[in-house]
Image (cartoon, rainbow, N blue to C red):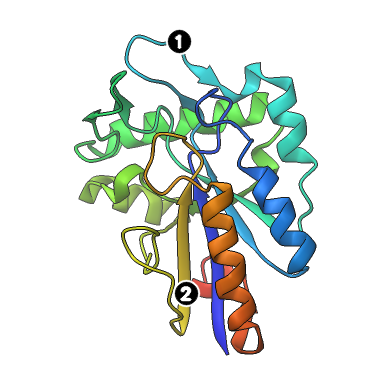
């Protein structure tokens, strides 16, 4: 059997990201009752010049995340500001690429603090996906020391890496509308056809189960 997990990055209250992406998740759940999604949530996503979209300030977002069925969804850490983007959606700073150990600790403590204020900290699994997979050696050490697993093993990322089955199949999409791998209705339909064609060979799993991260 091929183990399959679908992850979606940048699920946030930001209006260009938001939880709209969940609409296509529900349609897939209607077809594949056991499908598993790992949502990676940046705590205070923003573009340059914008106010922070801190998750604790958005009740609708909090309620939506809290009401997700645990049989189909899990929530992972994805940074505080994520990366810093300008209004043309060009990245200007990778949040964890150059941090020392103390700077990493401070960012994570802000993440934990806001998630606690939002009443969601108990839903986050101990898995961190670094924005753009950029992470300093000091940040890696910090995550290891506090028992946070690091998610970097992605082998399918439409349209950059096409749908294909591996022994452990990590499929990555994005919730932000400007990203080329945005989880649109068209991409969801493509995924549905692919999963249907291979359903007898697939086991849906959460990310922690796939990579023994707990």
Return the residue nearer the eye: 124 or 38.
Answer: 38
Q: Secondary structure at mark 1?
A: loop
What residue sits right under mark 2 in the picture?
169
Query: Residue at the location (46% across, 80% down)?
Result: 165
The one of 144 and 33 positioned closer to us in this rendering:
33
Quadrant into which the N terminus falls: bottom right
Q: Is residue 177 above or below residue 146?
A: above
Query: Residue 24 shows which numbered tag?
Result: none
Q: Position of residue 191 (x, y in %)?
A: 55, 65
Which residue does the image show at 37% across and 35% down from the upper left? 105
Disc 2 is placed on an element classified as: strand
Q: Is residue 72 visible?
A: no
Q: Are marks 1 and 2 in contact (CB under 8 Å)?
A: no
Front: mark 1 or 2: 2
In the image, residue 107 sits, relative to residue 138, either above or below, namely: above
Image location (x, y in percent) of residue 83: 32, 32
- Residue 204 location (% of width, % of height): 64, 74
- State whether residue 10 is above or below residue 149: above
Where's residue 182, x and y in %?
A: 46, 45
User: Which residue is at the front of the view, 48 or 137?
Assistant: 48
In front here: 35 or 192? 192
Which residue matches tag 1?
Answer: 51
**Apparent side of residue 202 relative to residue 50 in the rendered image (left or right):** right
Chain-order first, disc 1 or disc 2 = 1
The answer to which image quadrant residue 107 occupies is top left
């Amino acid at each position: 059997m091929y183990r399959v997990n679908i992850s979606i990055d940048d699920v946030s209250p930001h209006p260009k990201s938001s939880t709209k992406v969940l609409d296509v998740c529900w349609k897939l759940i209607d077809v594949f009752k056991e499908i598993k999604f790992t949502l990676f949530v940046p705590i205070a996503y923003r573009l340059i010049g914008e106010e922070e979209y801190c998750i604790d300030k958005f009740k609708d977002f909090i309620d939506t995340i809290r009401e997700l069925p645990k049989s189909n969804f899990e929530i992972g850490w994805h940074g505080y500001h994520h990366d810093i983007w300008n209004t043309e959606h060009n990245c200007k700073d990778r949040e964890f690429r150059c941090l020392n150990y103390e700077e990493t600790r401070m960012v994570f403590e802000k993440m934990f603090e806001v998630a606690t204020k939002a009443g969601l900290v108990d839903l986050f699994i101990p898995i961190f996906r670094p924005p753009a997979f950029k992470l300093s050696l000091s940040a890696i050490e910090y995550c290891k020391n506090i028992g946070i697993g690091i998610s970097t093993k992605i082998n399918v990322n439409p349209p950059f890496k096409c749908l294909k089955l591996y022994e452990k199949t990590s499929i990555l999409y994005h919730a932000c509308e400007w990203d080329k791998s945005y989880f649109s209705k068209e991409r969801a339909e493509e995924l549905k056809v692919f999963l249907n064609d291979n359903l007898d060979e697939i086991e849906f799993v959460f990310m922690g189960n796939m990579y023994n991260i707990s």
